[in-house]
Structures are given as C-alpha cells and as structure tokens.
Image: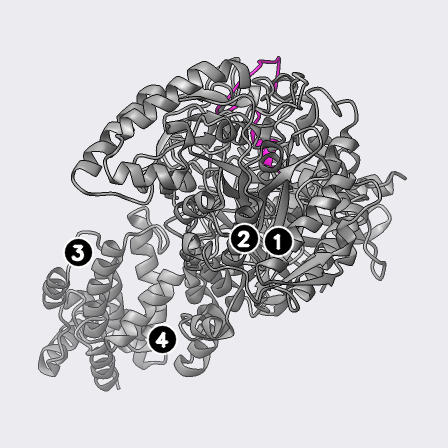
Amino acid sequence: MISDFTLASARAALRQRDISALELTNHFLTAIDTLNPVLNAFITVTPDLARAQATAADAALARGEHGPLTGIPLAIKDLFCTAGVRTTAASRILEPFVPPYESTVSANLLRDGAIFLGKANLDEFAMGSSNATSAFGPVINPWTRAGDNRQLVPGGSSGGSAAAVAARLALGATATDTGGSIRQPASFCGIAGIKPTYGRCSRWGVVAFASSLDQAGPIARTVEDCAILLGSMAGHDPKDSTSANIAVPDFAAACRRGVKGLRIGVPREYRSDDMPAEIETMWQQGLSWLRDAGAEIVDVSLPHTKYGLATYYIVAPAEASSNLARYDGVRYGARTDGADLIELYENTRADGFGAEVKRRIMIGTYVLSAGYYDAYYIRAQKVRSLILKDFTDVFAKVDALLTPTAPSAAFGLGERMEDPLKMYFNDVFTVPANMAGIPGMSVPAGLDANGLPLGLQVLGKPFDEETVFAVAQAIETAAQFTTQPSIRAKG
Amino acid sequence: MAYTIEGNTGPWEIVVGLEVHAQVISKAKLFSGAATDFGAPPNSQVSFVDAAFPGMLPVLNQECVAQAVRTGLGLNAQINLTSRFDRKNYFYADLPSGYQISQFEHPIVGTGVVEIELADGSTRQIGVTRLHLEQDAGKSLHDQSPTKTYVDLNRSGVGLMEIVSEPDIRSPEEAGAYLRKLRSILRYLGTCDGNMEEGSMRADVNVSVRKSGEPYRTRCEVKNVNSIRFVMQAVEVEAIRQIEVWESGGEVRQETRLFDSARGETRSMRSKEDAHDYRYFPDPDLLPLVLEQSWVDGLRAALPELPDTKRARYITDYGLSAYDATTIVDEQNRAYFFEGLIKQGVPAKIAANSVLGAISARLKSENLDFEKASPNKLNEISGVSISVLLGFKEQKISWQVANTIIQTTSVCSTEDAMREIAANEQITDTSAIDAAVDAIMAANPDKVAEYRSGKDKLFGFFVGQVMKAMAGKGNPALVNAAIKAKLG
C-alpha cells in the first residue's frame, strides 16, 4: 500500500521500478484532493508541476540516474519561496506574491530529484503554535481524541507540513523552526521533525520571521526519513552570511550508530509541577529505553532555561518588527491604496497583517524603542548568551539531552486563542534550542490517555545532528509507535 | 587671526563639524551583486536584495570593506579589526527593506586626522571621529506625474562611507579646505570619485556659534549640501542666522535644516522632537566584520603616495614653493601630469611653472581642466609639453615660444610639437646676431647716443628691436650679450 510507504521505502520501490514516480505522485495528489478540504494542510496544490516533475523523475530513473530524492513527492512549507509558484507565508499581504526565485533549500531538494506537491499551510509568517493564525484558515490535526470528534490543532507554525505528513498526503515536508515550529507540530501529529543547528540550512529565499533564530528542517514519518531529507536540504550557501561552511555528513548512516556509551543529560529545569503526569511518565520511559540501549543517563542543570521563553518573546518580535517592515505595498504583494504614502502604509499593513503578526510587530517595535532598548533587547541578548553558556557547559559532560517536546498533547481548535501567553507557553521546551542555535529533534514516543501522540525532544551539540539522529532513532526503535491518525489517506 | 563674525554684541566664533557621505568606488553594491554605474536607466541596476524581496539576504562586498580600510589608512585613522552592522529602521518609499544597514555602535574606522592648508600658508589639523560603511537609499522622483511618486532603486544598496569630523572647523574657508582635502585624499586612494554634482559625495553640515572662550552652544544640522561652495555658504548663512537668534534674545533649537542655494538661506526641516526613533539593533543577517591585521597591513603597503607626502616631497626634493606644491598636489591628475614631465627630464621648476601656467591655460581654452580631461587628452598634451619644454631646456626655443606652442590647440602630438620647435628654433649663430645688432644700431644712432649718455633703460628697446628683426628667434642670452658688447 502506497500510504504505508516511508520516504526510504518509497525510494527503494522507485529504484526497483516497483512503482513509478508518476503513480506515486498521482496517489498523493488524489489523497490531497480528498483530504485537503478537511485538513486544510495545503494553501496551494501544484498538480501540473508535480506531474511534470514526476515524468522527468521517471525518465531519469529509466536511465538509471537517481539522486537522493528522485521521484519523492514532498510538501513545501509556504514560507519557502518557490519560483513561479505563489508563496504567501499564510498572510494576506503576500497573497498575490509569486517569487521569481527558488529558495536554496527547496532548490537543493529539486536538485536531488524531489517532486513538489504544493505549498503547506502555516501560522501567518510562522508566528504561532497552533496554525490558527493563517490567513488561509486553520489546519486541522489528523488526530482526534479517542471517542471525541472535536477538531484539534496540529501545532505550529509548521502545522500544514506536519498534518500533511501525518495524514499521508506527502512522504515528507520542509518546515522551519524559530521557537519550536518544527518540533511542536511533529509532536502534536505523531511524526518526526528536526531543527538542525543554526547555519546548517540556508535561510536564503525563506521568508524571514526572526533571522537569528529561523532555521529550516524536515518533517517526516521516521527519523531516517528526516535524515535523508536533511542531507539534501543542508549545505553551505554563500548567499546566506550566517550559513555555516561545514561539510554535510551522512545523516542517514548516523541513525544506525546506536547509543551505546553515549551520555544523555536530563535537565532538571525542564521538570515543572504543572506538567501532566503522563508526559513525565513518557519522559522516564524514554530515558529507560536509552539506558536499555546502552546509554548512560546523567542529571544536568540548565539554570537559565527558565528565562528562555521571556527572552525569546523579546528577541523574536524585535527582529520580526524589522524584517516585516518590507511589506509596505510598494513593490510586491497586496496593497490598499491611501491618500498619501503614510496612509498607503497604514492601510496596506492594517489589511494585510493578522492580529498575532500585528501584536508581535508592536512588541518588537516597543522593545527596540529609545529608552527601552537597554532594558529589554540588550538584557535579552545577555540572557541569551547565558542560555548558550548553559548548553556549552552541559555538553562538556554529556553527548545529548532528552526532554519532552511540548508541555501538552494537541489541544482543541479555538482553545488558548484568547490568551496569547498561554499559547506562547507551548514553546517552553523548544525555545532554548533556538536561543542557543543547537539542533533539536522531536520523535513520537507514545500516546496520552486520550490516544493523542506525545513527542520526546533530543537536543545535541552544535553541528552534531548525527548524535541527535542516533538517539532519536533509538527512541523510535524502542517506542514502536505504529498508531495512525484517524484522518489519513488510504490505499 | 581667528575667523569671527561681527554681531551687534561683538565677535562670534563659529564651530563646524562635517558628516561627509562618500560613495564607495566598487563595481557592485555593498550587500548585493548589482552594478553601481551612474546614469543607468531607472531600476535597471536592482537585485532582489536591493528591492527587499521576501527571503533575500545581504552578503557583504569585500571590495567595499577594502575601500573603507584604505580610506581609513589615508586619514591616518585607527582601523577597527572588529566592527558590526546595525539596522536603522524607518519607513520610506525609497527604502525597500524599511531599514538601512549601517554601522552605529562599532564603525570599521575610528579616529583619524586631516591636515588642511589655508590661504595664508598656515596648516591646521581637523580631527576625524569615525568612518563607517552604510547603504544608500533609492531615489523618489516626485516630478514624473502630478499624482504619483516614482521610485528609482538603482542607488538602493550602493555602498557609502560616512566620514564624520570633529567640531574642529572654525570658518567657511576651513570647511572648504577640509572638503577639498578630503576629496583629494579619496581620489588619490581611488575609493570615491568625489563628484559632488553626481551626488557621489554629499555633506551634512553641523553649525553652532559661540562667544570666545565659551563651551559649545546648540547646533543645527544642514542636510545634504552638494558642493564645496554651497557648504561654505551654508556655514556662513547658518552662523549669521544663529547669531541673529541669540542676539534677539531667542534660543537656537536643535534641528535639521535644508540649504536653499537659490535663496542663499537655510530652512527648518524637522525639529529634534520630530526626530525618528531609528530603533538601531545589530543586523542578525550579518556576522560581525572581523579583519586580519596582516590583511590591513597589505592594504597599507599598497597605498599610493598621498597629497601630504607628495607636497612635502615637492618642496624638499624639487624646491617648489609651498603654494605651488599645494596647488599641484590638490588635483591628483595634475600631480601625475607634473611627475610625468619630470620623469622625461623636464626640470622641476620649469615643469611646475608650465603646469600651473601654459598647460592649465591650454586645458581651459579647450573647456577642460585636469579633472575633466580624458586620459587620452592628458596624454596628448603631456607629449606636446614634454617635447616643447625639453626644447626650451636645450635652448632651442624661448620661454615665450614654448608657452605659445603649448597653448596652440592645434598642436596635438609630439610630431606637431617637433615641427613647431623646428619652425621657431632660436638663432644661436653669433655672426647673424651681431649683424642684426649692427643693423639696428645703424638705424637708430640717436638712441645709441642716448644710451651711451646714461639712459640704461633703452637696453630693452634694443633687445626688442633685434628680436623683432630676427622674428623672435634670436637666443635671448646671446642677443643680450651681443647688444651689451656693442653698446659698450
């Protein structure tokens, strides 16, 4: 059954010519036709382009040429600019925007033979943890609570990517993670996702949210699938000054390393009284799996973690307030005219941005203002360097850290919208990795009492995604997570 | 004597600091690969980075960095091995990203000094506070349509060096001398073409006035003045305006003003209260700029000889007057022209006199000067001048003839010059000179008698007559000697 394919097994089937890229692509396009009206995982579907790419992939396969991803259908988060294909960032202000260029990450995937099914929904400008801020409507989580049909959020901001992969509408997806936007939706949707080290993937051509935190990464059903995708997405890009000139290792091989002899840290600050007991239980389960696989478990301290979220909500909005200044209606995107330039700006931005984006622009503008800059932005940068130092100190003693990915399972659509702080709290475990620039991966580890997936997060040293993959693979293998969401493509 | 302006309450000193925006000479913009040529059709030199399209990122152009370091070295300034780029946030239609990338807290170049020469022969040191790199904005065109403003982004992202002086300038003359010297240094370095008409060099002028011995009073900034003459005028009229404000019992308010060159006045643009809050913060798209000392040393070793060094060398090695030396080095092309003559064996003083005299006159008669003339034109005139001045040195032609040939615009090549020299070659044959002198004496017996009775001044009359008879070709020294001998 095609729906049972992982990316790795689909690739093997393509290479053995058991299935053609076109068959595979048509299968997913049909599945999207059926389920996207329910899930709203895609903002734009590109069937003609996908079929043309599939035909080219089949021709290449027939010639015996195969790249790492030849014939593999993917969803592309609608934050990655795609040449000739509308790129909206889930915002009204970019609704009509068709970029004439291809982001480096998506270009790398095309270079390796991937097929793009369409552009995945997300929180507007990647600002959100529920995918409810999209101007194109919320994404619905393919999972539901046992015996309860109420719709749940897929997490955010990469909710469309996560929902599409979980519902078997694509073999994998690109995503981005500024404060947890890959890991939290992966956890909510029962799939895997990795935010690599800052600088591992080029940010060129990715609509910017917070430049010092944004990092692209893959979402897929298995750890190995993520490793295969990241191998294609990553690499030095001279067009991004913050892209690291470091060779891309064989991530897929690293998945098979095992964890024997690794020291795994358990940061005590990630434990809190209001964390649901089942998450604590699952965390302990994860640690005992790793212990059984030969790892040593070590208690560690990250004393500044408690400031991570507060610091994040200064740094990220500050950068966003500046990054989003370019959406002014003058050169591209949506415009609402006005009597003069100021009115044009005001009308365009008032109509073009949603409430959450406006809130963050205002927070960011405020913290950068004269008189507040030192108290907020400068102090936040100082705390940020302390958070990084925490990790540096801890990684002198351990090889990786294990934590829960999120403080809860997926919540109901419409919940938490009235209280932004409650929503921001979703990112409490994921934000520190962005502040420090280190890699973090969420891997499904089990179900809560309602039958909803819960993820565990593996954090690693900068540019040591290989260890992260090895640890995540060990958990995946032990967890034997085979439950599937209630809404998914069949056949 | 310090410069002052006389008010009703006595003399006022003026205090001036200049912020000069100098466009970096570089094929590409500061953070994008787009070209920087002046005068290209609107929006033809714009990359997606310059137009701030979604997901576009700046990549620092290393050539612009090298140009800034060269300039810093030319200003005897501290080079900061670590500097940083910040975002200066404000909304305007010709600022596509909504922020200008600049260096706010950590500029690439720190304190330096510029030495200026004044008309009375004195020199002064003007401190340089800093030099930093930043992007230029685009251009808003308000005159293309009655209802719309058009935007040309060709200039958007072009690299600028902002060079900030200390408030060390005390007169309009010093302001002019500072700008001329700065421009001259930039041109020698090849880091900015200094062309104020095309906007590749612009000045913001900070002016305040005070009574002698007082601390600084409130200053006003006159924005974007685009010629040296206008800067000097702006300093003067703004100082006079401020003196009037103070003397009428008012208070000068800190504000930004515009210079209206047509009316010769400054006008308020915006007050300090209306000033933007630029929300500076480090640009997260760029890493700190870290330079290697050895790389800086390499740039230092490759610097051309700069005006101050050249001027000193002209005075000591060539025996030129301070004034001549200053005038020649002021313009890079003029100095190179002068040195070209010397290299071909023209004695320095002859070369200097000719460069400042006949050669400048020749350029002027062709509606040119050393700055405007093309390299080909300068080569052509150089070839002519070398032949002619060597002819003078070898006494083939007189100084007067030499000057005449150089200034003849139809003489355009070495061949033309050689022909003219041959046609005007001096007569050194003493028997021919003697014969000419004899003939003139024979024709003017009365003048001979007057001379011999003590009217020495008539000597010049005889020289003139003999030269005229010899069609100006008689060797002046030999003619003089012959007349002196024969008149006794």
Q: Are marks 1 and 2 on the same chain?
A: yes
Q: Position of residue B137 (x, y in %)?
A: 53, 38
Residue A443's spot in the image, x, y percent? Answer: 57, 44
Which amino acid type is marked by label 1?
A: Trp
Quadrant location of the C terminus of chain A in the rendered image: top left
Q: Amino acid at mark 3?
A: Cys
Residues at marks 2 and 3, CA–CA distance in whole angstroms: 86 Å
Tell me the residue that label 2 is attached to: A474
In the picture shown, does residue B430 fall above or below B166? below
The amino acid type of the residue labelled 4 equals Lys
Proximity of marks 4 and 2: CB atoms separated by less than 8 Å: no
Residue under mark 1: which chain is it in?
Answer: A
Q: Which residue is the site of mark 1? A: A289
For label 1, count other residues whose C-alpha is less than 10 Å away and answer few (under 14), some (14-19) or many (20+).
some
- Which tag is nearer the camera, tag 1 or tag 4? 1
Other residues around mark 4 within 10 Å, as few (<14) / some (14–19) / many (≥20): some
Chief secondary structure of the magenta portion = loop
Marks 1 & 2, CB-CB < 8 Å contact: yes
In the rendered view, tell whether residue B438 sits above or below residue B241.
Answer: below
Image vertical order of residue B405 relative to residue B222, above or below: below
* Residue B336 belongs to the span the image colors magenta: no
Q: What kind of residue is marked 2? A: Ala
In this rendering, the label closer to the viewer, 1 or 2: 1
CA distance separating discs 1 and 2: 8 Å
Q: Residues within 10 Å of mark 2 (few under 14, many from 20)?
A: many
Discs 1/3, front: 1
Which residue in the protein does label 4 denote? B349
The magenta span reads A322-340
Residue for badge 3:
B412
Question: In what quadrant of the picture does the N terminus of chain A appear?
Answer: top left
